[in-house]
Image (spheres, rainbow, N blue to C red):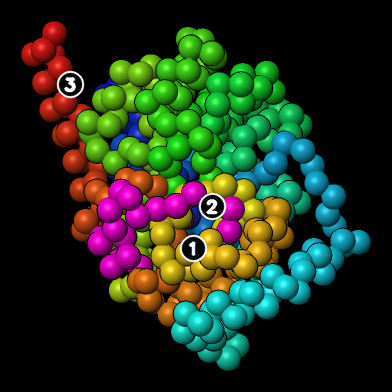
């Protein structure tokens, strides 16, 4: 499973693992892949500073990456803009009514937190500044190309830049802006995703950007067979996300029985692509929460970042309640294969073993 990206980053396997958990990211890097820490959950730069220091100390000197959420176009934001005041009262009332209807209790007194501010451009820039004081080898952007000055700043510090693309034209734009690695994320993926399936998207992007730009296949990848298919389509590695939600290490970040029951019982048909999570199309687990937003009379989701500010406290309450019928979870169609909780090292080992078996089977055919 060795490709040029392995030598580029000093890793054993071209398996890139996006995760909001530093414990998962560190375990993937120690197992030979490249753990990539999602930073959107960090409102406090001091907390991110501590987390990246922990990663520095717990990856056995092996490389890791950081994922930020930064739009190419710089939005108007700052102290002069009260974002919460821009949220219509009708939307607030709908969320309150829905939580009550679904039986979601309030958080205990004193708990809760400000809306997730990592969706704001200014906060994402602060995440980058913190990351540059540590030792990531890759900065990935979940919303395509970051601004050119950000790409140049990363290059000045010796970091590679990756950006997600859901169409060949987006990938070409990323390359023109200076992005080094394209993540071709298919429709099957969890979280923000486009409308083209991986089987079609990957060769489209590989052919569009040419042989000098590495492409990572993403979306619906949770087995070694799927990694083999991705490399056969021309990608140099894979970008994985959902499968790490079902690992023991992830329980350090999100631990309740409802969460585990929700994904272990789900099939590949139990997801929905919707704007209710952040304001941009994202694939979530289909639950009573997502269904409520699809009912007649429900308001239309707000644009990013207003939608996230609207629902962030609701998500905290839903997840704390532990009700698997309601829980709000960004996850891809690969959830149908996530039937048990396993250590990260076991997941990596099974990916590699299945890959080798698949390639061996193909060699017999050839």
- The N terminus: image quadrant: top left
| Disc 2 secondary structure class | strand
Disc 2: CA contacts within 10 A as few (<14), some (14-19) or many (>=20): many
Q: Which residue is mark 3?
A: 359
| Residue at 65%, 32% in the rendered image | 145
Q: Pick the residue in front: 337 or 325.
A: 325
Magenta span includes 260 = yes
Q: Pick the residue in front: 290 or 357.
A: 290
Percent of width and height locating residue 17: 40, 42
> What's drawn in magenta, residue-wise?
259-276
Q: Is residue 70 rendered to the left or right of residue 236?
A: right
Percent of width and height locating residue 223: 24, 38
- The C terminus: image quadrant: top left
- Tell me whether circle 1 and circle 3 mark residues in contact (CB < 8 Å): no
| Residue at 61%, 26% in the rendered image | 170
Q: Which residue is mark 1?
A: 290
Q: Which residue is mark 2?
A: 274
- Tell me whether circle 2 and circle 1 mark residues in contact (CB < 8 Å): yes
Q: Quadrant of residue 140?
A: top right
Q: Quadrant of residue 302?
A: bottom right
Q: Earlier in the sequence, mark 2 or mark 1?
A: 2
| Disc 3 secondary structure class | helix
For this orientation, the residue located farthest to the right is 80
Give the CA separation, mark 3 to mark 2. Answer: 36 Å
| Disc 1 secondary structure class | helix
Say if 304 sits above or below 221 in the image: below
Q: Quadrant of residue 354?
A: top left
Q: Is residue 319 visible?
A: yes
| Residue at 42%, 31% in the rendered image | 197
Q: Is residue 109 rendered to the left or right of residue 359?
A: right
User: Residue 5 shows which numbered tag?
Assistant: none
Percent of width and height locating residue 33: 35, 37
């Amino acid at each position: 499973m060795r490709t040029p990206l392995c030598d580029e980053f000093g890793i054993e396997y071209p398996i890139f693992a996006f995760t909001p958990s530093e414990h998962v990211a560190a375990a993937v890097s120690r197992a030979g892949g490249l753990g990539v820490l999602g930073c959107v959950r960090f409102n406090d730069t001091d907390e991110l500073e501590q987390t990246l220091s922990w990663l520095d100390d717990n990856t056995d000197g092996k490389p890791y990456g950081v994922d930020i959420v930064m739009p190419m176009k710089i939005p108007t934001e700052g102290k002069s803009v009260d974002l919460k005041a821009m949220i219509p009262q009708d939307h607030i009332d709908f969320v309150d009514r829905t939580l009550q209807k679904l039986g979601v209790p309030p958080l205990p007194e004193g708990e809760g937190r400000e809306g997730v501010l990592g969706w704001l451009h200014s906060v994402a820039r602060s995440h980058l500044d913190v990351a540059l004081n540590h030792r990531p080898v890759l900065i990935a952007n979940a919303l395509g190309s970051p601004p050119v000055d950000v790409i140049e700043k990363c290059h000045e510090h010796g970091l590679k830049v990756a950006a997600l693309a859901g169409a060949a034209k987006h990938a070409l734009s990323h390359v023109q802006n200076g992005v080094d690695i394209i993540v071709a994320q298919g429709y099957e993926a969890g979280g923000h995703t486009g409308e083209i399936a991986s089987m079609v998207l990957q060769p489209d992007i590989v052919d569009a950007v040419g042989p000098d730009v590495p492409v990572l296949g993403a979306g619906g990848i949770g087995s070694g067979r799927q990694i083999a298919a991705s490399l056969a389509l021309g990608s140099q590695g894979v970008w994985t996300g959902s499968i790490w939600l079902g690992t023991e290490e992830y329980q350090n970040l999100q631990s309740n029985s409802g969460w585990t029951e929700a994904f272990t019982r789900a099939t590949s048909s139990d997801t929905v692509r919707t704007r209710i999570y952040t304001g941009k199309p994202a694939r979530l687990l289909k639950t009573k929460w997502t269904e409520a937003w699809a009912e007649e009379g429900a308001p239309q989701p707000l644009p990013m970042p207003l939608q996230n500010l609207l629902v962030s406290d609701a998500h905290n309450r839903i997840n704390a309640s532990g009700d698997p019928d309601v829980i709000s979870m960004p996850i891809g169609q690969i959830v149908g294969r996530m039937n048990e909780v396993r250590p990260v090292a076991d997941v990596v080992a099974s990916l590699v073993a299945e890959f080798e078996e698949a390639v061996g089977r193909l060699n017999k055919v050839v």
